[in-house]
Image: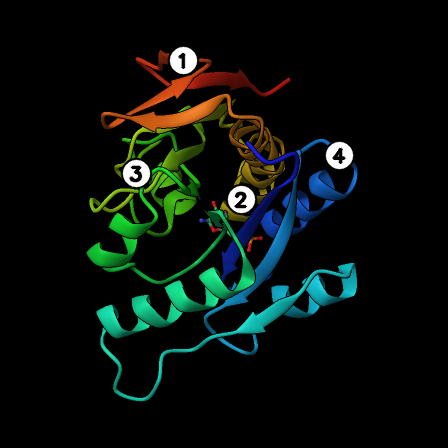
C-alpha cells in the first residue's frame, strides 16, 4: 500500500462531498491525495471549487453521439493518465457501463443519500418525507453493476424531524455525508477496507452490515 493513495473524484454538481474529501486529504485525515477531479459537464460548480482548493480538475463530457461504453473508456483513460488508483463518485449523475465498473471493481465507491437498500435512485429526501419515514441518512458503498446496490460500507442515520422539509433534510444528510465519506476513503487508503469475493471487508472481516454512525 502506497503511503499516500492517489484517488479521483467524479462529480456533476457543486461538489461539497468532493471538497470534504479534498479537505480530509489536505489535513491528513485521509492518507491520500486527489489526483484529479473530473466533472461530466464543464459548468459543474465543483470543478471551479476544486481548482480554487488547488486540486487538478477537468471536464470530460461525452463526445457527441458517444454511447455509455465509449464514455466509460474515455473516463478510464483520463483516470489512468491521472495516476488515480481509486475512484470516489460524489454526485456523479451518470450511469457507468459494465466494462468501466469491472475495470475499477473494488476501487470504486459511491455516496448515496439514503439508507440503502431503501430509496435507491433520485429525489430520496422528497420520497422519504412523502412516505412519512422517521429514519433517513446516507450510505457509502462499493459500486457494482447494479445501480445503488453494491456492498454497503458505512451509513449515517438521522431521525426525520416533524418540521423537516426537502431542503432541511438534504442539508442534514449532507452534513453526515461529509463525515462518513472521508471516513470510508480513509479506511481504503490505509488498506483497512476492501472488496473481497463480493463483500465489503474491514480489517479483514466481512461486513455483514454497514458500519453505522448515528447523528450526534
Ligand atoms: C450528495 O447528496 C450525494 O449523496 C449524491 O449527490 C449529492 C452530491 O452533492 N450522490 P455534492 O455535489 O457533493 O454537494
Mark earlier in primary sequence (4, 3) = 4
Q: Nearer the viewer, mark 4 or mark 3?
A: 4
Left or right: where 80 falls relative to 83: left
Q: In this orientation, which residue lies closer to the viewer: 47 or 206?
A: 206
Residue at x 40%, y 27% (from the top left corner): 194
Distance of label 4 from label 3 (alpha carbons): 33 Å
Label disc, if present, on residue 28 of the rendered structure: 4
Residue at x 53%, y 39% (from the top left corner): 169
Distance of label 2 from label 1 (alpha carbons): 34 Å
Residue ID for mark 1: 204
Disc 3 on helix, strand or loop?
Answer: loop
Q: Are discs 2 and 4 less than 8 Å apart at CB?
A: no
Residue, far bottom: 64
Q: Is any part of residue 133 visible from this angle? A: no
Mark earlier in primary sequence (4, 1) = 4
Distance of label 3 from label 2 (alpha carbons): 14 Å
Please say if 15 is above or below 165: below
Residue ID for mark 3: 119
Residue ID for mark 2: 170
Task: Pinpoint residue 185: horizontal percent, then vertical percent.
Answer: 54, 35
Residue at x 35%, y 15% (from the top left corner): 207
Amino acid at each position: 500500500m502506497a503511503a499516500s493513495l492517489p484517488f479521483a473524484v467524479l462529480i456533476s454538481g457543486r461538489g461539497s462531498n468532493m471538497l470534504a474529501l479534498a479537505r480530509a486529504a489536505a489535513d491528513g485525515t485521509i492518507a491520500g491525495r486527489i489526483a484529479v477531479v473530473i466533472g461530466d459537464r464543464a459548468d459543474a460548480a465543483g470543478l471551479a471549487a476544486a481548482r480554487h482548493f488547488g486540486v487538478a480538475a477537468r471536464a470530460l463530457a461525452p463526445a457527441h453521439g458517444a454511447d455509455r461504453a465509449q464514455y466509460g473508456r474515455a473516463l478510464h483513460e483520463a483516470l489512468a493518465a491521472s495516476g488515480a488508483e481509486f475512484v470516489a463518485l460524489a454526485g456523479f449523475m451518470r450511469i457507468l457501463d459494465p466494462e468501466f465498473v469491472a475495470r475499477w471493481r473494488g476501487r470504486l465507491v459511491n455516496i448515496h443519500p439514503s439508507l440503502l437498500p431503501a430509496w435507491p435512485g433520485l429525489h430520496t429526501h422528497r420520497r422519504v418525507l412523502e412516505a412519512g419515514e422517521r429514519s433517513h441518512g446516507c450510505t457509502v458503498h462499493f459500486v457494482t453493476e447494479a445501480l445503488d446496490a453494491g456492498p454497503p460500507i458505512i451509513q449515517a442515520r438521522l431521525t426525520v424531524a416533524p418540521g423537516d422539509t426537502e431542503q432541511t433534510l438534504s442539508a442534514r444528510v449532507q452534513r453526515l455525508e461529509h463525515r462518513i465519506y472521508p471516513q470510508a476513503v480513509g479506511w481504503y487508503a490505509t488498506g483497512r477496507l476492501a472488496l473481497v469475493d463480493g463483500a465489503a471487508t474491514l480489517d479483514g472481516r466481512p461486513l455483514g452490515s454497514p458500519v453505522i454512525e448515528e447523528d450526534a
